[in-house]
Image: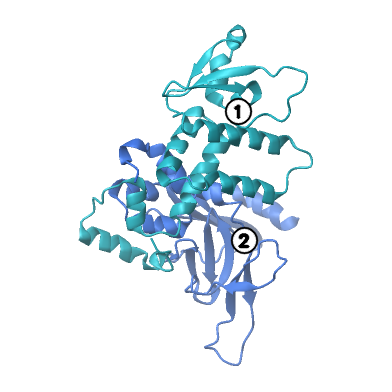
Chain colours: A blue, B cyan
Amino acid sequence: MTNVENIPYELMTLILLKLSVKSLLRFRCVCKIGYALIKSPSFISTHLKSHNNEDAHLVVHNFEYRFIDDSNYPFEYSLFVDKTLKDLSYQVLDSQFPIHGELNGPYDGLFVVWQREYDLIYLCNIATRETRALPKCRFGYPHIYGCGYDPLSDGYKLVFLRLFSLEDGSNYSLDSHVSLYSSDNDSWRYLQVSELRQYFCRYYSC
Amino acid sequence: MASSSSSSSTQVKKITLKAADGKHFEVEEPVAMEMETVKSFFVGNEDAMKDMVVPLLNVSSEHMPAILDFYRNHSEFRKRTPPPPAEEVKAFNEAFLENKSDEQLMEMIMAANFLNTKELLNFLTEAAANRIKNKSVEYVRAFFGIENDFTPEEEARIRAENEWAFDGLDED
């Protein structure tokens, strides 16, 4: 077989970048250098970018009201097996999503699953089958939110924007709150951004 | 070497490449220019083209004919209108990789890297990935010639983190 001295590290990286997440999770066991490489943020983000388009699949979120029996899940996630949609058979993804709720994303590879009835939010990575429940956000439901990878902190951020109406006698005004979740320290930060009021007024007027 | 079928009345300029073991290869200029390393050799040095021999220190003569064949065919695929059917490209690529050992594949990856040709490097690294994608950890260590430097406990712990990733593998 080949000799390790002959294969530069950068070329081994090029080969690993072509592999699926499943193969990479397995090959973390190969050696310590490989483990560190496959876990490194730069490798993960390059891998995500290079696989983002070619592996595009359509995830479908079925929502069914079933009032008869509470034990039935009202949600189902599935994935069309054929990208061209000539074949409409699908694969149910529920084993990869241990929880059910409103699905949004993917945002840089992550899905956000929201269980409104319990006010719980989860970040799900289908590729690695990892799910994380977020700590509760002080301000509850956002009006708008977004999620994405932040290379500076090497983690994901979730931003919630929430609008409050304030009534003081006959005066009526709007206040806004921004909640920022960071996956690297698994916590929320709360900011008050007064300029956002303007934005919200416009947002609601259009 | 495959002969160029597009030989017309106009003389195609040739460039001489010298492999690591000293063997010379005469290559049509457009084919030679597929290699960034060769191209950069001539940038700003147009006069030198005719008789200069380009040394390719990291490429063994064993792999030169196959590599040149790849450039000739793929540059023809790119230029052809309408583009060639996917099956034709696939058939060429499969034939190219047939009977190549893992070691030969690795050597060609290093050659493609030295020659600085993205298309070939991309194709070969993809081929290497296909050879290992459904294989065991032990197989991949042997493929790259890597020693396991984890203790059995450490390895067991990492395996346990993603047990599902070890399901449904091919035989080594």
Total labels: the figure holds 2
Chain letter of disc 1?
Answer: B
Chain letter of disc 2?
Answer: A
Q: Residue at the spot x=78%, y=39% of the render?
A: B81
Q: Quickly name the residue at label 2.
A: A57
**Outermost top residue:** B47
Left/right of residue A49 with respect to residue B85 in the rendered view: left
State the residue in front, B134 or A106.
Answer: B134
* B57 versus A154 height, above or below: above
Nearest to the eye among marks 1 and 2: give it.
1
Dividing the picture into quarters, in which one does residue A102 lie?
Answer: bottom right
Could you give the CA–CA distance between mark 1 and mark 2, rounded to whole angstroms? 34 Å
The answer to whether residue A42 is seen in the rendering is: no
Where residue B117 appears, as percent x and y from the top left, is 55, 32
* A1 versus A132 height, above or below: above
Q: Quickly name the residue at label 1.
A: B34
Where residue A202 appears, as percent x and y from the top left, is 71, 52
Where residue A153 appears, as percent x and y from the top left, is 42, 46
Q: Please identify the quadrant where the N terminus of chain B is shown.
A: top right
Few, some or many residues within 10 Å of mark 1 (<14, 14–19, 20+): many
State the residue in front, A104 or A180.
Answer: A104
Left/right of residue A140 with respect to residue A200 in the rendered view: left
